[in-house]
Image (cartoon, rainbow, N blue to C red):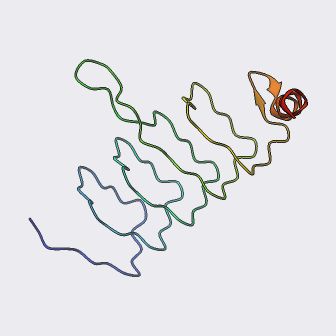
Amino acid sequence: MPSKIIKRHVSIPESIFEDLNLFGSRFTNINLSGATFHDINFSNVSISPANFSGVKFMHIGPAPDDTGQYPKQGPVSFTEADFNGSTFQQVNLSDVQISDCIVDGMTIDGIPVTDMIIAYKEKHG
């Protein structure tokens, strides 16, 4: 196995990286705008701070096993995130906790969340 590679202050636009093992690597002050990631294992990755404007997350979670079953996804945490105008479709939100969030205009199955909260508070005080 080759030794660790350290590169600083390098510009390599339009580069192609394929079949890499970057386990334990560290990326600081990186411009990945316009980059494409495919078949990436991001398990236990920490990204902070980040501008995710226009980013698309698709097919999130473990790949199916040999029987075609999808193993349970580990928990994901979003803190101080702005999802204004975002869409979540066919997303498993079981056991998700939402707290101290601005939900004006947010709907679930077409029902305004603020209306649900008001109805709940009226019923349960």
- Residue at 32% over, 21% down: 69
Front-most of 107 and 51? 107
- Residue at 50% over, 35% down: 58
Question: Where is residue 13 drawn, in percent x and y?
Answer: 43, 65
Residue closest to the far front: 125
Residue closest to the far top: 67
- Residue at 34% over, 41% down: 39
Label count reads 0
Q: In the rendered view, does 59 fall on the left or right side of 5?
A: right
Quadrant (top left, top right, bottom left, bottom right) of the C terminus: top right
Q: In the rendered view, does 19 fall on the left or right side of 31?
A: left
- Vertical comparison of 32 with 43: above or below: below
- Vertical comparison of 11 with 82: above or below: below
Q: In the rendered view, does 74 fall on the left or right side of 117?
A: left
Question: Where is residue 78 drawn, in percent x and y?
Answer: 58, 52
Front-most of 82 and 40? 82
Quadrant (top left, top right, bottom left, bottom right) of the N terminus: bottom left
Question: Where is residue 15 drawn, in percent x and y?
Answer: 36, 60
Q: In the rendered view, does 85 fall on the left or right side of 63?
A: right
- Residue at 46% over, 33% down: 59
Question: Where is residue 86 drawn, in percent x and y?
Answer: 70, 40
Residue closest to the far left: 1
Front-most of 86 and 101? 101
- Vertical comparison of 56 with 72: above or below: below
Q: Quadrant of residue 64?
A: top left
Q: Quadrant of residue 9?
A: bottom left
- Vertical comparison of 22 with 29: above or below: above
